Image: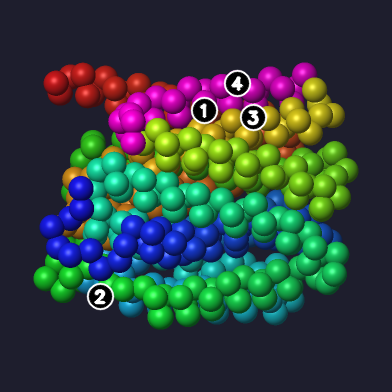
Amino acid sequence: MTSSHPTPMSARRTALIGGLMVATGPLSLTLYQPALPTLVEDLDATTTGIQLTLTVYFAAFALAQLICGPLSDRYGRRNVGLLFFAIYVLGSLIAVAAPSLEVLFIGRFVQGFGVSAGVALSRAMVRDQFVGSEAIRILTLINLILTVTPAVAPTLGSIILQLGTWHYMFVVMAGFGLAILALMATNARETLPEAARVPFRPGTILANYRRLLAAPDFMFPSLLLGLTFTGFHGFTALLPFILIEGMGLTPFQFAMAMLVQTASFILGNLVVTYLSRRISGNQLLVIALCLLGVSGLAFGVLPRVFPNSVAAIMAPVGIWMLGLAFISPAATAAAMAGFGAIAGAAGALTGFFQVGGGFVGSLAAGTLFGDARTALVIQLPVVAVMVIGVALLDLARSKRNR
């Protein structure tokens, strides 16, 4: 079922543009993953300091969405997207020239601010045009496109590191941002009609966010989304130090190991694309919760039993990514379903929970534990329990309201 106004873009074009916009986020995260240990030496920094470059990125990414979404509700998705991706390119160029950790922090903050448009606007563009199972299928396609970037990025990053320095990784990010700007300028159409736009007033913005935060139908799926990404970005921050520093993998071997993560996510998206036509979003969530529970248990057990095994690390990662593929489109569609009139704000707030989960996950991984392996075997099982707990609370709420 489509929305009542004419569809400015086809489902395929919406998925392609939305997927590439969203892909900029993980590109900025995973391309320089193989260089994290190198950055410790080159910038005379600590492991914690380099991990905080991820945290700074996530903080800006999360907070900027709260501005980006309402701006797009007022000025349209396309115009705001062009502005924010220009900011992303500026941040990438700052990082290219970073002579110190402090300047790299600034570049990563500006990058995170600009790239926030990817999540917020892609979801709003889908909600402007599609609802129900069709929206889930398009969001799943966007997620599938999204997996191509982290599949290629660590391998590309390791090659760049062998041929040059980590600075060139940020040159690639700037180039990708310029390509997105060109795509949006030439191929993207505005999906928000003039008549549907709302004023950009602080009072209106706060009222919209209060409405969303007070709505259980929005909050529960958003919390599930945020916690799932807390786990994902937690182990994303830890894996380079566990596999490269702790287990002695080369950057290229690390990139090969990370293909387990990407392949699992691609497989999960393909299965979700097939199942979304046959089962409900709630049934997809149940499958996701089972997978995340198994993954949390495996994180707590396998690295302890097989401390020198890469498979003992990557098997739980792969299962978590399967669960993430199931939970992301279903939870996103469920959170935004009843809020078409403020789709920009709803997309921004779901993105805030998702990326805010990344902020919490990377911050906890880098600061609360003595070493990366300890963080992995404690943090991920705890997050899995929290995900299941939120889901059970939502189930109990639904039963009471019947």
Judge whether residue 164 can be spotted in this image.
Answer: yes
- The crowding category of the residue bearing disc 3, from other C-alpha atoms within 10 Å (few below 14, some 14 to 19, many at least 20), is many
Looking at the rendered structure, the secondary structure element under dot 2 is: helix
Q: Quadrant of residue 132?
A: top left
Mark earlier in primary sequence (1, 2): 2
- The crowding category of the residue bearing disc 1, from other C-alpha atoms within 10 Å (few below 14, some 14 to 19, many at least 20), is many
Q: Is residue 187 above or below residue 109?
A: below
Which of the pair 260/41 is nearer the observer? 260
Q: Disc 1 and disc 4: Cα gap in Å?
A: 9 Å
Q: Which residue is mark 3?
A: 316
Q: Indicate which label's residue lies in the foreground, 4 or 3.
A: 3
Q: Quadrant of residue 8?
A: bottom left
Q: Residue at left 54%, top 78%?
A: 178
Marks 4,2: beta carbons within 8 A: no
Q: Which mark is residue 75?
A: 2
Marks 1,4: beta carbons within 8 A: no
Q: Position of residue 254 (x, y in %)?
A: 78, 47
Q: Is residue 335 above or below residue 375?
A: below
| Amino acid tagged 1 | Leu
- The crowding category of the residue bearing disc 4, from other C-alpha atoms within 10 Å (few below 14, some 14 to 19, many at least 20), is some
Q: Residue at left 72%, top 22%?
A: 302
Q: Which residue is mark 1?
A: 292
Mark earlier in primary sequence (3, 2): 2
Q: Which residues are magenta?
A: 277-305
Q: Which residue is mark 4?
A: 297
Q: Residue at left 74%, top 38%?
A: 371
Mark earlier in primary sequence (3, 1): 1
| Amino acid tagged 3 | Pro
Looking at the rendered structure, the secondary structure element under dot 3 is: helix
Q: Residue at left 58%, top 26%?
A: 295
Mark earlier in primary sequence (4, 2): 2
